[in-house]
Amino acid sequence: MTEIKVTVDGVSYVDQVEARLLLVHYLRDVLGKTGTPIGCDTSNCGACTVLMNGVSVKSCSVLAVQADGADITTIEGLADGELHPLQRAFHEEHALQCGYCTPGMILASVDLLRDNPNPTDEQIREGLEGNLCRCTGYEHIVRAVRSASQAGAAR
């Protein structure tokens, strides 16, 4: 067992974990952060995307021990008393159907808008290409990210 210290959604944790424990399983099974879904477990779908030190990562491809000392943001920690502008935009633009990919899409979009506060539709599509959605056809997702961008979500 290895001791890790992480901050998740603003709360500090110290835990003993097995060296092979994936971050997604640590978040869900140890911390109860079930808003981070387990998708493909192969880093192909992006459903499990979280922010690690502000950068989007697929938590099924990161070991919990690799997150030692990191600041992790999950979909549960994104809102601060009210919906984050991207969460609101996804709702208002109907950018979800089943909702399975939504947490990962939103967190990847946070990272995208941090790097490029005013992306074109093509840049949005390119920025989210590692996150798959099987329901929406992406049009509403692109519209939501564009809407959040125009509302100043990156600021």
Image (spheres, rainbow, N blue to C red):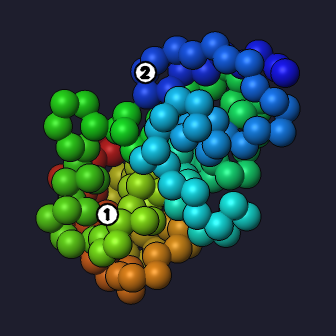
Query: Would residue 109 appear left or right of 8 to someone viewing this image?
Result: left
Answer whether residue 41 is visible to the viewer in this image: yes
Q: Position of residue 86 (x, y in %)?
A: 28, 53
Residue drawn 33% across and 45% down? 154
Q: Position of residue 132 (x, y in %)?
A: 52, 74
Residue drawn 69% across and 61% down? 41
Question: Quick check: marks 2 and 1 in contact, CB under 8 Å?
Answer: no
Under mark 1, the amino acid is: Val
Question: Which residue position is annotated with label 2?
Answer: 10
Residue drawn 28% across and 37% down? 79
Near-viewer residue (85 or 115): 85
Figure check: 21 above or below 95: above
Q: Position of residue 96 (x, y in %)?
A: 30, 71
Residue drawn 51% across and 55% down? 37
Near-viewer residue (62 or 98): 98
Query: Would residue 67 appear left or right of 84 to someone viewing this image?
Result: right
Query: Would residue 86 appear left or right of 60 to someone viewing this image?
Result: left
Question: Which residue position is annotated with label 1?
Answer: 145
Q: Position of residue 2 (x, y in %)?
A: 82, 20
Question: How many residues crowd mark 2 within 10 Å: few (<14), some (14–19), many (20+)?
Answer: few
Q: Measure the alpha-carbon separation of dots 2 and 1.
A: 25 Å
